[in-house]
Image (cartoon, helix red, strand yellow):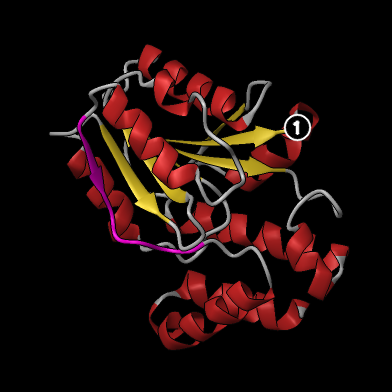
Amino acid sequence: MDDFGIFAKYWEPGRVKTRLAVDLGFAAASELYREFLVTLVRRFAKCADMRTLVYTPDESADEFMKLAGDCWSVEPQSQGCLGTRMTAFFDHRFEQNAERVVLIGSDSPSLPIKYVESAFRALHSSDVVLGPTDDGGYYLIGASQKVGGIFEAIDWSTDRVWEQTIARAEALSLSYETLPGWYDVDDGNDLKRLGIELAEVAAFDSNLNHLLQAINRII
């Protein structure tokens, strides 16, 4: 069974997309972040056998249930640092009989669906799959077994995350594959890049067209 998750945070102004807020203001940045989530939920609604929005904080459950609709389940993130929370997510999914688990964040709304599909295929023969971002992190991580140790001793939110994660995989003798690079939308320059990309593909994807219209409205 293939299990797909998105880590997400409630879109409270001042709590999300703070680097974008430098250019847009807190209210606009949070509204934009919610549009990212809407886009991801719609675009990946048929991806994998199970789909879960993994949210924080706990008290935002009702809002995420509204966002999830009929195609997604919702569950709260555990407590602790990002590595602890991701370990808990993967462990829980494998305990629910998942065979392959893929997790992304909510910062890459235009992530090609084919990259996620490729990740699941890679997990038929590899322990781990990762998709690198331009800033030294990763936009996707997947596993075909419990791999909690891969999230240990990582300097989260730095440009060392990718290289440290690869080093952990090698230290644990985990086989891994890498996907093509992609990017997170974290600041104004990233948003400009997204806008250019969406202008080129929006005519062929109604969900990305909706996102482009939302960006133009918000900013």
- In the picture provided, is 67 more to the left or to the right than 111? right
Q: Nearer the viewer, residue 139 or 117?
A: 139
Q: Residue at x 29, y 21 (%)?
A: 172
Kindly report the secondary structure that dominates the magenta region of the rendered protein. Answer: loop
Q: How many marks?
A: 1
- In the picture provided, is 24 more to the left or to the right than 196? right
Residue neighbourhood size for the residue with mark 1, other residues' Cα within 10 Å, grouped as few (<14), some (14–19), many (≥20): some
The magenta span reads 175-183
Q: Residue at x 28, y 59 (%)?
A: 114
> Quarter of the image containing the N terminus?
top left
> Quarter of the image containing the C terminus?
bottom right
Counting from the top left corner in percent of width and height, residue 59 is at 80, 29
Position above or below: 166 against 113? above
- Residue 90 drawn in magenta: no
* Residue on which the image places disc 1: 57
Position above or below: 118 against 152? below
Q: Residue furthest left?
A: 125
Q: Secondary structure at mark 1?
A: loop
Position above or below: 140 against 190? above
Q: Residue at x 26, y 49 (%)?
A: 178
Q: Nearer the viewer, residue 173 or 99?
A: 173
Q: Residue at x 51, y 59 (%)?
A: 135
Q: Quadrant of residue 49?
A: top left
Counting from the top left corner in percent of width and height, residue 185 is at 59, 65
Position above or below: 35 against 161? below
Mark 1: amino acid: Pro
Counting from the top left corner in percent of width and height, residue 140 is at 41, 46
Counting from the top left corner in percent of width and height, residue 150 is at 40, 26
Residue 101 in view? no
Residue 80 in view? yes
Q: Residue furthest top?
A: 95
- In the picture provided, is 215 more to the left or to the right than 162? right
